[in-house]
Amino acid sequence: MKHIRSFLLLFMVTLLPLQLSASDNGQENELDIPEIVLEHLSDAYEWHIASYKGKSLQIPLPIILRSATTGEWTFCTAETLPEPYYFDAEHHGKIYERMSDGSSVRPIDLSMTKAVMQIWIVVAVLIGMFLFCAKWYKNRDEKSDAPKGFVGMMEMFVMYINDDVIKSSIGEKHYRKFAPYLLTVFFFILACNLIGLLPVFPGGGNITGNINITFFLAVCTMLMVNIFGNKEYWKEIFWPRVPVFLKVPVPLMPVIELFGVFTKPFALMIRLFANMMAGHSIILSFTCVIFLGWTMGTGFGLGLNAFSIIMLLFMNLLEVLVAFVQAYVFTLLSAVFIGLAHQEEHAAG
């Protein structure tokens, strides 16, 4: 208990300069918590690291645009964005092109945004992790002990997901060809979730809280399910084993089953997106409460600081658990959907 109190006191002292800065700025500008939260959750064309006395420390990211009118390509950064391009605040800071008649259109945007850079960082981390593990297995002696430390932990995760999730959900006959995809999805989501919890560069990216990313992952699972589904799976969709009056003359059950082809990946997309975005929003909100309380006076500042710090510690620990749970749930449901697409033919009668 003594160590916990000492840690909380040290954390408050560390935040004191930021709190004093917030007190000075709060006299001039009102703290807009929803705007701050949305700004941190949204994608950006530059990687903001910190701000101090009105100056920002940020990493410019390459912007790649193709004009909707001339077809010319433009390479620049956010600070050197040329006319007629501009950042549209009504569309969350996305780049638009201003036409000669005053209208605006969206150009082809292949920019390396913060989300894209965070994905490349996650990919680099995963490649480094698995190459390290592969090197250990390649160099180990056949008589050596079981892997320990980091390699042992990775083997535990791989064996658990492969044996208890993928194999048991899809079946021993078909699971092998889907295991690489499902293991990749699990570790990608897990790494994105954990790195996203880091408050400083190279973390802090809201990848799995970005619906575009979860949409792509859900589409990949939908393609795996429907492209490799067997004839029994499609038979259950277009001619399910239900009374005939539910299939003709009005194809009620086939329509419902066909609708389910799209609702399953939609559920995957929304579940991952909503849970991760909500966790990031709550953590950012409690962080803003620290500055909000300090602008209301010393008494409010100290009281809200203590409350916010405790809740921040609790939410960050909870989000670590959620990071594992959401990666596990997405992989499990994907494996279940793939398994349902490989049903064995029912016996007649």
Image (cartoon, rainbow, N blue to C red):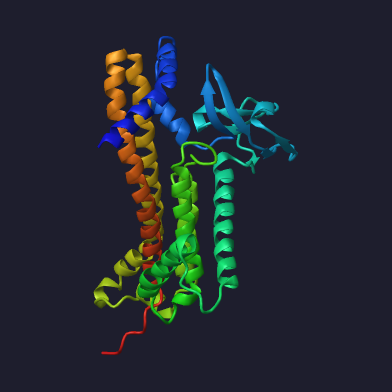
Residue 29 x/y as whole percent? 43, 13
Q: Residue at x 37, y 29 (%)?
A: 11
**Towards the viewer: 214 or 258:** 214
In this view of the protein, which residue sits in the foreground, 218 or 134? Answer: 134
What residue do we see at 34% from left, 50% from top?
321
Q: Residue 112, located in which quarter of the rendered image? A: top right
Image quarter of the C terminus: bottom left
Residue 37: quarter of image: top left
For this rendering, which residue is in front, 38 or 47? 47
Would residue 96 be found to the left or right of residue 218 on screen?
A: right
| Residue 190, percent from left and from top | 44, 54
Q: Position of residue 113 (x, y in %)?
A: 59, 40
Residue at x 48%, y 71% (from the top left corner):
178
Q: Quadrant for the N terminus, please.
A: top left
On screen, residue 219 versus residue 45, left or right, reads left
Residue 223 appears in the rendering:
no
